[in-house]
Amino acid sequence: MSIATNIKTIQSQLPASVQLIAVSKFKPESDLMEAYEAGQRRFGENHAQEMTAKHEHLPKEIEWHFIGHLQTNKIKYIIPFVHCIHSIDSAKLLAEVNKQALKHQRKVNCLIQFHIATEESKFGFSWEEAVEMLQSPEFATWENVEICGVMGIATNTDDTSLIRKEFRQLKHFFDQLKTEYFPTNGHFKEISMGMTGDYPIAVEEGSTMVRIGSAIFGARNYGNAQ
Ligand SMILES: *Cc1c(COP(=O)(O)O)cnc(C)c1O
């Protein structure tokens, strides 16, 4: 299947309210251009330098979504152009994003990443940690970040009932945060969940953004990276 066909097929399964983020990490710019020519404008990457290089070379209408663990010393590369950072996994990182965004006189969209999987290796806040950050006096002073919602990665498993439970948990966190901290904030509306293996479940459970790589571009060749 061609990249264009894959995008069309996936789009036809998504409700209009769900955004498709094409996860293009490790893929050559020619693949991204194929997707672009098929109408795709939102791309997800998980390495700062790789995203920065692609941003420099590819059309400027592209919206760049950062979806991987972001080291604070890499923020500066992406801050001038990134559309949304899905993977805010600590208060320290958000503070640093705010600081860099201020330098560039930008307000940067961010999602709070929750740890919803059973695997220990996945990054993200617990509910308590998120509340602690949102209630901290510093949080109120971070004017250069816009909290637009939440993100999560489900356990990598064939157990669909576990995946569904985890997505439901994330939706519940979103609803709670909306009620308690963002009731009048129209920006707080995104739930980034669902990948190639589990996006139909994520959509059923209320996803507003699916991050899909392999089903669009084919399997990735990681070498020894991840
Ligand atoms: C790689 C990645 C994806 C896409 O994974 P696929 O299974 O190829 O769709 C989605 N989200 C995150 C955070 C990723 O790192």
Image (cartoon, rainbow, N blue to C red):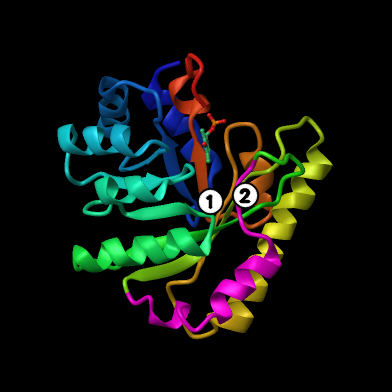
Task: Report the front residue among 217 and 91.
Answer: 91
Residue 15: give its label: 1
What kind of element bears circle 1?
loop
Residue 110 appears left or right of 128:
left
Image coordinates for residue 47, horizontal then vertical, percent: 38, 36
What kind of element bears circle 2?
helix
Inspect the image, locate mark 1, and give the three-letter code of the amino acid beneath it.
Pro
- Identify the residue shown where x is 39% and y is 70%: 146
Asked if the stretch drawn in magenta spans residue 208, the answer is no
- Identify the residue shown where x is 38% and y is 75%: 142
Q: Which residue is mark 2?
A: 203
Residue 109 appears left or right of 124:
left
Task: Report the front residue among 33 and 96.
Answer: 96
Q: Which residues are magenta?
A: 122-143
- Identify the residue shown where x is 48% and y is 14%: 223
Asked if the stretch drawn in magenta spans residue 138, the answer is yes
Q: Earlier in the sequence, mark 1 or mark 2?
A: 1
193 to 138, vertically: above or below: above
Image coordinates for residue 184, horizontal then vertical, percent: 49, 85
Q: Is mark 2 within 8 Å of ligand 1?
A: no
Task: Report the front residue among 130 and 34.
Answer: 130
Q: Is mark 1 within 8 Å of ligand 1?
A: no
Q: Are marks 1 and 2 in contact (CB under 8 Å)?
A: yes
Q: Quadrant of residue 200?
A: top right
Q: Residues within 10 Å of mark 1 (few under 14, many from 20)?
A: few
Inspect the image, locate mark 2, and give the three-letter code of the amino acid beneath it.
Val
